Image: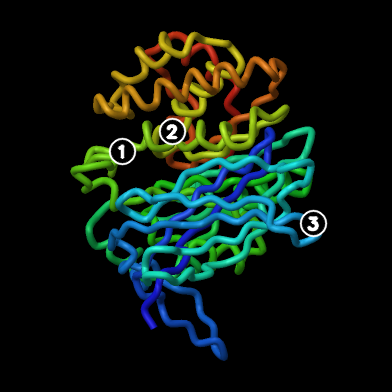
């Protein structure tokens, strides 16, 4: 039966609140054979391009199963929600969240699922890792390669074992992982299959919602963001830190094929050098990695200020940046120079590795 269900869900419990990012859809799920499970390919979820609006009720449940919080929220035109709720009500902590859809069938509350918020441990140790060209050697250079990637499970592409080992070493050391990818949102099922196959336990996955690229009303991304990753990735990095709070240790893993070095050093400049957010943003927004629209410019600058204020509570943050390259690109990535002086002066903090 066609009905609403959760396409993605993330709830982060930190800094006195629970930050919830979720998307609801009524597109049909890819069919799975429970007796003979196989990794899904991204094209099996291509139906997730549909957009719809939903109304969601969030219920907070305490340790003793009391309902201590309940509030309704409206989605954007793509069924996405980005909300914050208190993590404690009347001295009781929210330990579980139930979500219901209220508008699909009149007068009926459809339970979409029960979830445990992801609790950020103290002291905070966060690792954010790219996916394509970092954990898996995917190829998107031609239309033929793009089509092949859509119809092929990610388990068929070569793993980059050096990066996988680096990620696992840090998670074993207590770092809590977030996977940040510029892959389309309908890759989620395929990516989670890959995580399961490779025993990587990273439930916090951020993907690019391609539906918003073609929105004329409330989309933040535009067609230029299909190739320019600067705004999308830096925006998502800041979103992660605004949800978790600025950690005492932050590890960033990316690749030398795109603009990851530049993006990570921009974040480093805010958190370590205490660069004025407006001065930084006024310079980097002109870079080819960003090419900002006026809407992106105004919305993201306010986030930079929020992060700058938040970072003052943890002035001794330790940031490590790892950039992966292969044999053909290693020297170029290692010797990369940046036009902006405040970026160039920090490039020595990058640890380049061959994998």
Q: Nearer the viewer, residue 291 or 52?
A: 52
- Graded by Cα atoms within 10 Å as few (under 14), some (14 to 19) or many (20 or more), the crowding at tag 2 reads some
Q: Nearer the viewer, residue 101 or 141?
A: 101
The image quadrant of residue 121 is top right
User: Callout 3: helix, strand or loop?
Assistant: loop
Task: Check contact, mark 1 vs mark 2: CB within 8 A.
Answer: yes
Label 2: which residue?
235
The image quadrant of residue 1 is bottom left
CA separation in Å, label 1 and label 2: 11 Å
User: Callout 2: helix, strand or loop?
Assistant: helix
Q: Position of residue 171 (x, y in %)?
A: 72, 47
Whether residue 158 is visible: yes
- The nearer-to-camera label among 1 and 2 is 1
Q: Nearer the viewer, residue 288 or 218?
A: 218
Disc on the earlier residue, 3 or 1 = 3
**Total numbered labels:** 3
- 341 left or right of 172? left
Identify whether 39 is placed above or below 126.
Answer: below
Label 3: which residue?
63
Identify whether 292 is placed above or below 222.
Answer: above
Write the residue at 38% across / 37% down. Answer: 232
Disc on the earlier residue, 1 or 2 = 1
Q: Residue furthest left?
A: 216
- 312 left or right of 99? right
Q: Position of residue 14 (x, y in %)?
A: 68, 38
Q: Residue furthest bottom?
A: 35
Label 1: which residue?
220
CA separation in Å, label 3 and label 1: 38 Å
User: Callout 1: helix, strand or loop?
Assistant: loop
- The nearer-to-camera label among 3 and 2 is 3
């Amino acid at each position: 039966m066609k009905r609403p269900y959760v396409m993605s869900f993330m709830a982060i419990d930190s800094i006195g609140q629970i930050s919830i990012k979720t998307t609801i859809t009524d597109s049909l799920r890819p069919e799975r054979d429970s007796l003979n499970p196989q990794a899904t390919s991204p094209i099996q979820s291509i139906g997730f391009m549909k957009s719809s609006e939903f109304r969601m009720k969030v219920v907070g449940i305490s340790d003793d199963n009391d309902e201590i919080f309940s509030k309704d929220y409206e989605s954007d035109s793509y069924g996405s929600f980005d909300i914050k709720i208190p993590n404690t009500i009347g001295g009781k902590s929210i330990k579980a969240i139930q979500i219901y859809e209220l508008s699909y069938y009149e007068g009926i509350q459809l339970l979409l699922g029960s979830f445990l918020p992801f609790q950020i441990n103290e002291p905070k140790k966060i690792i954010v890792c790219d996916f394509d060209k970092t954990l898996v050697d995917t190829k998107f250079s031609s239309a033929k390669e793009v089509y092949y990637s859509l119809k092929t499970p990610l388990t068929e592409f070569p793993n980059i074992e050096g990066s996988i080992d680096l990620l696992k070493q840090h998670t074993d050391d207590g770092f809590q992982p977030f996977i940040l990818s510029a892959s389309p949102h309908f890759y989620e099922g395929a990516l989670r299959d890959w995580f399961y196959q490779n025993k990587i336990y990273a439930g916090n996955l951020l993907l690019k919602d391609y539906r918003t690229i073609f929105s004329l009303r409330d989309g933040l991304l535009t067609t230029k963001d299909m190739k320019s990753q600067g705004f999308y990735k830096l925006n998502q990095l800041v979103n992660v830190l605004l949800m978790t709070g600025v950690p005492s240790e932050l590890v960033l893993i990316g690749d030398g094929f795109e603009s990851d070095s530049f993006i990570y050093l921009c974040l480093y400049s805010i958190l370590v050098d205490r660069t004025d957010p407006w001065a930084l943003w006024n310079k980097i927004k002109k870079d080819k990695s960003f090419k900002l629209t006026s809407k992106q410019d105004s919305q993201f600058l306010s986030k930079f200020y929020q992060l700058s204020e938040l970072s003052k509570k943890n002035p001794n943050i330790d940031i490590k940046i790892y950039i992966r390259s292969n044999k053909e690109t290693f020297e170029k990535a290692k010797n990369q120079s940046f036009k902006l002086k405040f970026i160039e002066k920090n490039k020595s903090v990058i640890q380049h590795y061959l994998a």
